[in-house]
Amino acid sequence: MALMDLAQQLFPIHRTLVNRGFDQSLEILQQHLPLTIDGYRSGTAVWDWVIPNAWDVNEAWIERLDGERLVDFRDSNIHLSAYSVPFDGVVTHEDLLKHVAIHPDLPDAIPYNYLYYNRDWQFNVTHHQFARFTDDHYRVRIDIDERPGELKVGSYRLPGETDDEFIISTYLCHPSMANDNLSGVLVATELMRQLSRLPRRRQTWRLLILPETIGVLTWLSHNEELLPRIRGAYTVYNCGDSGPITYKQSWFPGADVDVAAAHVLRHYPTLGGEARVIPWHPSGSDERQFNAPGVRIAGGSFMRTPPGEFAEYHTSLDTLDILDPDALLDSVQALFRICRVHDENRILAPTYRGEPCFSRHEIEYPSYYDDRGDESKMLVKKLIYELDGRRSLLEIADRWNEPLHRVVDIVRSFERAGLAREVLGTESVVEPKPMRGHQGVSP
């Protein structure tokens, strides 16, 4: 799948929380990934929220009284704020300006706004269009098809050896904006395609493609029985610009999702400069819902340049030209490595006493000169003391500032030699107590 080809197919479609464009976009994605698409009826209570009606635009424009059209939804589907109410009539210049928004800093940009839960109407225009509002009166028409519909959620579940799940969540409700958030949808879709090709997965992974906020609240409220077995979530957005990867931590200090992400970003190079990890804060996207009271799923955010930190954010300037194909693939690869960390992170206990005789097991052991020289060759010796049935491989790797894959490769050789065994579930492991005296001699 060429990510940019899919982006070009999805970009022009007008999408919002519930509408035909959202449904059409999921159907296009379903051609690339076998999504399950579930619908939830308008008016349904989802905890403290209510699923809104479907909302599609038939036409929306502003004209001078002589018929000259100044603003037209057909020219940009960002011109009308989402969920504006119908209107047809003549307004004064003063009244019109109460219903028009411009970007404060970008004169050529149409700002993106929405009125999801406000019964009002609003147009969004460039500074040039705004300067043409010089008449005393204008004709405004907003013809809306608002009706009961279904909020759609696309999901794809990849079962693993355990039913414990990690969620990859991304949102599709923004119209014609590329980095926010077609990029997240493209990256998450390709990530799942790559995970599906693995011959073995320890963890179960679930992709959710939904409208922001109300979509994840809807899914969570309808799947409360699953929440206890969800080990963590990654919300994916703003993944296509050329900036460095940014990871925002979850609400939970030291959560598995945060440790895994930080490990990957520390040990594996990424495009755009040095990756950064930033602390939890209650802004952003659907990570807020995962971490919230009553849910309390550790949810981090994977992105490149965060919302509001690239100039084109929430404007008509967030076009396909912003997307860097290499950055999209780099984002996929970083997320794939994070997922592999979760799959490869285990706890192992030793079956030996004292230092094993590695030559008997054909395991390369560092020499005296390695002890004094290359520290990287010392990892075998270090692992003798670290496999205690308590600490995970990721904890051990971070303790010695080693990439997890090096620890995993050595531990596999221990397992093949019968020197280590995996600790499963809630099994309690007690290290062998030191032997006192010699065999056959009373202590």
Image (cartoon, rainbow, N blue to C red):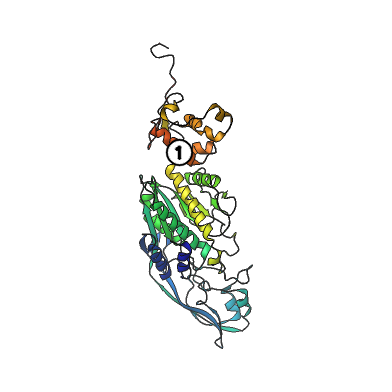
Tell me where residue 389 appears, x and y as whole percent.
43, 32
Tell me where residue 305 appears, x and y as whole percent.
57, 57
Q: Residues within 10 Å of mark 1 (few under 14, many from 20)?
A: few
Tell me where residue 105 appears, x and y as whole percent.
64, 67
Tell me where residue 148 appears, x and y as whole percent.
38, 70
Q: Is residue 292 above or below residue 418?
A: below
Quarter occupied by the C terminus: top left
Quarter occupied by the N terminus: bottom left
Residue 169 falls in which quadrant of the image? Answer: bottom left
The kind of residue tagged 1 is Asp
| Along the viewing direction, whichever of 33 and 315 lies nearer the viewer | 33
| Along the viewing direction, whichever of 379 and 400 lies nearer the viewer | 379
For the view shown, which residue lies furthest in the top direction?
A: 442
For the view shown, which residue lies furthest in the bottom direction?
A: 66
Q: Is residue 53 above or below residue 415?
A: below
Counting every numbered tag in the picture gives 1
Q: Is residue 324 above or below residue 274?
A: below
Residue 238 visible in the snapshot: no
Pointer 1 residue:
409
Residue 351 falls in which quadrant of the image? Answer: top left
| Along the viewing direction, whichever of 4 and 134 lies nearer the viewer | 4
At 47% across and 48% down in the image, what residue appears? 337
Residue 12 visible in the snapshot: yes
Secondary structure of the residue carrying numbered label 1:
helix
